[in-house]
Image: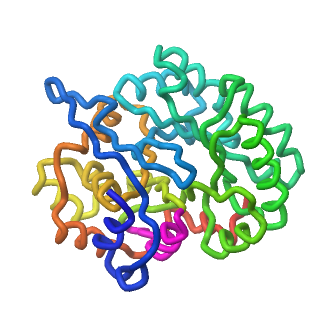
Amino acid sequence: MNRSNFIKSSAGLAGFLTIGKSFAASDFLANRKDNETVEKDVPMITLNNGVKIPQLGFGTWTLTDKPDQYVREAIEVGFRLIDTAQGYQNEAGVFKGIKDSGIDRKDIFITSKVGPDVMRNRSVKQSLDISLEKLGGEYIDLMLIHWPVVDHIQETWSIMEEYVNKGLLKSIGLSNFNPHHIDDLMKYAKIKPVLNQIEIHPTFSNMENTGITLYKDIAVECWSPLASGNDLDNSVLQSLAKKYNKSAAQIILRWNMQRGLISVTRSTNVAHMKENINIFDFELSPIDMSIINGVNINQRTSAKNDPDNFPW
């Protein structure tokens, strides 16, 4: 699985993305018992700094009530990538869920994000120290800039680089960055971003941003891959779900997997958690991949999510 998978499966970009270094991702190992999905089913994407990240993760946005329970349940189902943020106000609860799971910390990949407010308030160092304490006190696997607060990106990135050099952050990256934001950052960055987490789902494929980001040897991670559930009733996706005897959610997540993208899903329902991770026993045909590409109508889950004009 590499960047060429995205090129082959993404209409309109094949001519644009024809050269460059490939991402490496390990072949996933089938290891099932009684149709139960386990950790080894999830492929690992190798980031540009050599760090490996699970290709499918569990998101915790809005999970301020019992985040420890939901994170523990997600880990029990098989998730090993856990995504949180300072703005979610649940970092401590997320880490409690990780501890309660009984899985070694080294086997869990934790992502958090620096919030826009702390960037504007110039309290990034303090916020990182607080996040580190809430998330175990040792290190964070991946820290992202949550939104491109333009006048404060350089200062924030420089501080994050300091924390990488201290071994407190293993990797640093971006969230909701458009290509021009990345171009500006690369003019002064001493450490290259490993990842850009952006809104991607069938009705908002964000194809141009995705392709350009991959071309820069920066991994792409999808937030809201199911469009907060809005894409699940799409008739095309429902038809494909029947064809493969899968749910629409599984079709969407498999579409992202085959394009070499990382996805983060969120659910408080254990059955849905199991459904979301049980996507490695089938493969979408090239034609069906193209059909899903055609669902795009450039519709964000909210107009406020525009990285060039966001209100928070």
Q: Is residue 63 left or right of residue 1?
A: right
Is residue 168 positioned above or below 201 on the image? above
How many numbered marks are there?
A: 0
Q: Residue 277 appears at what percent x and percent y?
A: 31, 39
Who's the residue at 12% across and 53% down the image? 244
Q: Mostly what secondary structure, the magenta segment? A: helix
Check the image and name the residue furthest to the right.
122
Is any atom of residue 299 visible in this view?
A: no
Assign the N terminus to one quadrant of the image. Answer: bottom left
Who's the residue at 48% across and 27% down the image? 107
Query: Of 307 and 157, which appears nearest the observer?
Result: 157
Who's the residue at 47% across and 43% down the image? 53
Who's the residue at 51% across and 61% down the image? 199
Q: Is residue 205 magenta?
A: yes
Query: Of 17 and 190, which appears nearest the observer?
Result: 190
Q: Residue 210 appears at what percent x and percent y?
A: 48, 68
Is residue 243 positioned above or below 5 on the image? above
Q: Is residue 211 left or right of residue 232?
A: right
Quarter of the view holding residue 266: top left
Check the image and name the residue furthest to the bottom.
15
Query: Of 217 and 306, which appears nearest the observer?
Result: 217
Q: Which region of the structure is painted magenta?
A: 203-217
Is residue 88 positioned above or below 46 on the image? above
